[in-house]
Amino acid sequence: NAGVTQTPKFQVLKTGQSMTLQCAQDMNHEYMSWYRQDPGMGLRLIHYSVGAGITDQGEVPNGYNVSRSTTEDFPLRLLSAAPSQTSVYFCASSYSSRGGNTIYFGEGSWLTVV
Amino acid sequence: AQTVTQSQPEMSVQEAETVTLSCTYDTSENNYYLFWYKQPPSRQMILVIRQEAYKQQNATENRFSVNFQKAAKSFSLKISDSQLGDTAMYFCAFMRPGRGNTPLVFGKGTRLSVIA
């Protein structure tokens, strides 16, 4: 059981480049989300999804796109990378049956934009 | 919007001693969920403990327990018999009620150092 898998783990981008952070889970979880973690800021929600075909914005969605074509995958796309997007990105998933379910996190993706 | 406040950016404790991390939150909801996550230097997010607001009994997991004060909107984490492996960032998080899971709102974290 792999849990929540994020790729790549480390990435360096040049300003203006685009890229996709991949997230996959093998637990048949309906709920998936992306957070970014910056020093002194905790984790902030970027986008989330309650099921295939359904996505919604979080606290800091600008500059990011998501889609949820399957239950397993929830990729995060950076359209035109900026130095302000240098951060550690976490994907998370959980069941969404009644609320309050434990949310499981991937190991994080370190992104540097130069 | 809900907010979560962790007022202690850094704390330290001697090995085998007890330490309490503070967390307060702001919400108009009556039922909700609260969590403490641990993030060791590896950056992995590990669930420590979970509390449902409608349960008055404080949650306990081995050496970890909470003091949940609903009226005061306070959710502190007590770590007993601190171990070197407890050194980590600790995040308090809030989940509002919904038909299913809703996004977690995190505090900014408390960095805990356990000293030998």
Image (cartoon, rainbow, N blue to C red):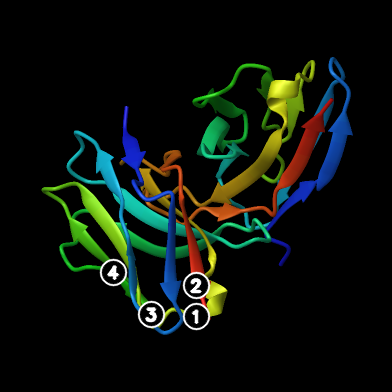
Q: Quadrant of residue B4?
A: top left
Task: Looking at the image, tell me whether mark 1 or mark 3 is earlier in sequence order.
Answer: 3
- Which-is-in-front pick, marks 1 and 4? 1
Which quadrant of the rendered structure holds the N terminus of chain B?
A: top left
In this view, A78 is above or below A68: above
Residue assigned mark 2: B114
Label 1 marks a residue whose chain is B
| CB under 8 Å between discs 1 and 2 | yes
Task: Looking at the image, tell me whether mark 1 or mark 2 is earlier in sequence order.
Answer: 1
What is the CA distance from the residue labelled 3 to the residue labelled 2? 14 Å
Residue assigned mark 1: B83
Residue assigned mark 4: B59
- What kind of element bears circle 3? loop
Instruction: Identify the residue at image location x=41%, y=84%.
Output: B16
What kind of residue is marked 3? Arg
Please state if B62 lies on the left or on the right of B55 as rendered. right
What kind of residue is marked 2? Val
Label 4 marks a residue whose chain is B
- Which-is-in-front pick, marks 3 and 2? 2
- What kind of element bears circle 1? loop
